[in-house]
C-alpha cells in the first residue's frame, strides 16, 4: 500500500523470516558463529535460545541458505509432533526414499543411519535443525537423543540444532533430560538490540527494500527503541504502522509523534509489560 509511495520495491518490515533482511548485530553475528562452529567442527548438539521476535528463525533461515552443497540439511518447523512423526519428517526433509517398506520406528532409523553413513563416506556433513524446540515433548527429546547416537568411531555424522524460546533451557535442565543436556557443548542466547543497533536495523531493512524516500528522525529512533525494547519483531510492527500512518498523512518524515500514534494503533495486547503504561503517560502528559 505505502511501498510505491515511498519508493520501496517491497515492504521493508514484513514479519516473514526472510534471510535477505537478517541484520547481523554483534549478538546475531556471534550466534551465527556459534552455529557455524558447531556444524563445521561436528560438535553434535547446538542450542540457540532467545525471546519471541528476537530473530532466531531468520537467523536459521540465513544459515541454511548460506550452507553449501557439502552439507545436507533437514528443517523441522512443527515441533508439536510425536516420535514417529519426527522421524518421518526428518526422512522427508533429507529426501530419503523409503520405498515400500512398512513405516516403523526401526526402519526409519535404519534408513536414516544408512543415509548418514553414505553422506559421511562422500565427505559431506548433515544438519538437522528443529525450530520452536521448547514445545518438544520429553518423549520426542529422548528420540532426538537416540538419533544423536548415529555416529562413527571418530566423529558425529549428524549435527542437531535446537532453536527455541528461553523455556527450552528450562526444559533441557530437567533431571529427566540430563543425558541429552550433557551432550550439548555449543549454546548461545540471543538478547534484544541496543539503541544504536535498533537504528542500524531499521536502516538495513530500508536499504534492502530499495532505500525509499522516507526519513526517520532521531526522536523516532529513540521512541522506537524505548517502546520496542530492542525486539526486532516489535520494531517491524511499529515501523510498518508508522509508514502507513505517514502515507495517509502524506508525510515523508517519520517523527516521534507518528511513532507514538503507531504504538497506540497497535494496541496494548501487543505490547510487552509496562509498554502501555509508558505510552499512556506520554500521551496524556
Image (cartoon, rainbow, N blue to C red):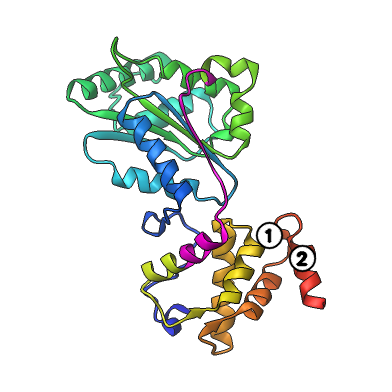
Furthest toward the top, the residue is 153
User: In the rendered image, which residue does mark 2 sit on?
Assistant: 278
Please, what secondary structure does the residue beneath circle 2 have? Answer: helix
Left or right of residue 274, residue 251 in this image: left
Quarter occupied by residue 68: top left
Q: Is residue 172 magenta?
A: no
User: In the rendered image, which residue does mark 1 sit on?
Assistant: 270
* Label 1 environment density (alpha carbons within 10 Å; few <14, some 14–19, many ≥20): few
Up/down of 1 relative to 17, above or below:
below
Question: Toward the viewer: 264 or 283?
Answer: 283
Question: Toward the viewer: 174 or 224?
Answer: 224
Q: Which residues are magenta?
A: 181-202
Mark 2 and mark 1: Cα distance apart in space: 14 Å
Quarter occupied by residue 195: bottom right
Up/down of 255 relative to 234, above or below:
below
Return the x and y of residue 82 as percentages of the image width and height.
53, 26
Quarter occupied by residue 40: top left
Mark 2 or 1, nearer chain start: 1
Please, what secondary structure does the residue beneath circle 1 have? Answer: helix
Amino acid at each position: 500500500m505505502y511501498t510505491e509511495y515511498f519508493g520501496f520495491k517491497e515492504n521493508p518490515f514484513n514479519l516473514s523470516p526472510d534471510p535477505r533482511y537478517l541484520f547481523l548485530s554483534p549478538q546475531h553475528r556471534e550466534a551465527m558463529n556459534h552455529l557455524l562452529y558447531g556444524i563445521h567442527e561436528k560438535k553434535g548438539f547446538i542450542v540457540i535460545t532467545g525471546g519471541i521476535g528476537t530473530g532466531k528463525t531468520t537467523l536459521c533461515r540465513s544459515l541454511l541458505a548460506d550452507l553449501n552443497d557439502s552439507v545436507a540439511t533437514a528443517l523441522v518447523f512443527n515441533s508439536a509432533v510425536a516420535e514417529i512423526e519426527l522421524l518421518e519428517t526428518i526422512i522427508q526433509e533429507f529426501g530419503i526414499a523409503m520405498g515400500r517398506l512398512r513405516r516403523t520406528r526401526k526402519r526409519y532409523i535404519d534408513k536414516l543411519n544408512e543415509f548418514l553413513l553414505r553422506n559421511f563416506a562422500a565427505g559431506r556433513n548433515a544438519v538437522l535443525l528443529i525450530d520452536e524446540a521448547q514445545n518438544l515433548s520429553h518423549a520426542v527429546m529422548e528420540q532426538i537423543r537416540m538419533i544423536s547416537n548415529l555416529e562413527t568411531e571418530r566423529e558425529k555424522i549428524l549435527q542437531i540444532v535446537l532453536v527455541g524460546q528461553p523455556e527450552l533451557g528450562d526444559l533441557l535442565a530437567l533431571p529427566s533430560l540430563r543425558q541429552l543436556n550433557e551432550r550439548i557443548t555449543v549454546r548461545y542466547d540471543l538478547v534484544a538490540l541496543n539503541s544504536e543497533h535498533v537504528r542500524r536495523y531499521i536502516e538495513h531493512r530500508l536499504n534492502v527494500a530499495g532505500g525509499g524516500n522516507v526519513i526517520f528522525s532521531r526522536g523516532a529512533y529513540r521512541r522506537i527503541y524505548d517502546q520496542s525494547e530492542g525486539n526486532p519483531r516489535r520494531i517491524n510492527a511499529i515501523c510498518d504502522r508508522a509508514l502507513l500512518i505517514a502515507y495517509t498523512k502524506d508525510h515523508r518524515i517519520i517523527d516521534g509523534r507518528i511513532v507514538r500514534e503507531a504504538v497506540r494503533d497497535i494496541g496494548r495486547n501487543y505490547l510487552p509489560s509496562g509498554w502501555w503504561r509508558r505510552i499512556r503517560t506520554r500521551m496524556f502528559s
